[in-house]
Amino acid sequence: MTDEDFMRQALDQARRAGEAGEVPVGAVIVAGGRIIARAHNLCERLRDFTAHAEMQAFTAASEFLGGKFLDQCTLYVTLEPCPMCSGAAYWTRIGRIVYGARDQKRGGLDFHGKRDEGLLHPKTELVGGVLEEECAELLTSFFRSKRKN
């Protein structure tokens, strides 16, 4: 499977979040070519500001693998991770992060097209903009509908 294929799986998770009234961000973690964790935002449901899709996925992947390091894994997430999630990614030593839409206001990884070296583990590969338009449109539509109501 390609980065686009895995990002589509993350988009499915984001849609589930949106349907539940959560900000539509989804994530999957892949190891050895197979998805080992699927997650989406749960902040509203859990009343927990730290329940971002990435945080949920890190926990599920670590549980699946039986350890806290995810250096052989790739995180696919529909929105550029915030500083909190970027910091957590650092500590997991995630091997690769692939994100869809850029977050100009709260993103923690990609500042004006330049990787922020302080928030990522030095060995983490970063790829941005995968299915960016589709990921961004999902978020834009969600917030547009919230403003109408």
Image (cartoon, grey):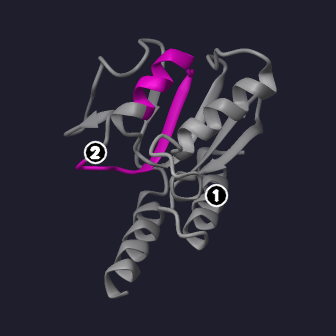
Image point 56% across, 22% down: which residue?
Answer: 94
Residue 6 drawn at (x, y percent) = 65, 48
Image point 48% across, 25% down: which residue?
Answer: 88
Q: Is residue 120 above or below residue 114?
A: above
**What residue sits right under mark 1 in the picture?**
13
Occupied quadrant, residue 36: top right
Q: What's the mark number on residue 114?
A: none
How packed is label 2: few (under 14 Cα within 10 Å), some, or many (20 or more)? few
- Front residue of this view, candidates 69 and 30: 69
Q: Secondary structure at mark 2?
A: loop
Q: Is residue 102 left or right of residue 47?
A: left
For the record, the magenta segment spans: 85-105
Q: Secondary structure at mark 1?
A: helix
Q: Is residue 69 left or right of residue 66?
A: left
- Front residue of this view, candidates 134 and 138: 138
Q: Quadrant of the N terminus?
A: top right
Type of amino acid at the residue the image marks with label 1: Gln
Occupied quadrant, residue 108: top left
How packed is label 1: few (under 14 Cα within 10 Å), some, or many (20 or more)? many
- Front residue of this view, candidates 46 and 30: 46
Q: Is residue 145 above or below residue 18?
A: below
**What residue sits right under mark 2 in the picture?**
106
Q: Are marks 1 and 2 in contact (CB under 8 Å)?
A: no
Q: Earlier in the sequence, mark 1 or mark 2?
A: 1
Q: Is residue 79 above or below residue 69?
A: below
Residue 149 drawn at (x, y percent) = 37, 87
Q: Is residue 12 magenta?
A: no
Q: Which residue is most to the left?
A: 112
Image point 37% across, 39% down: which residue?
Answer: 82
Q: Is residue 144 left or right of residue 48?
A: left
Residue 123 drawn at (x, y percent) = 47, 13
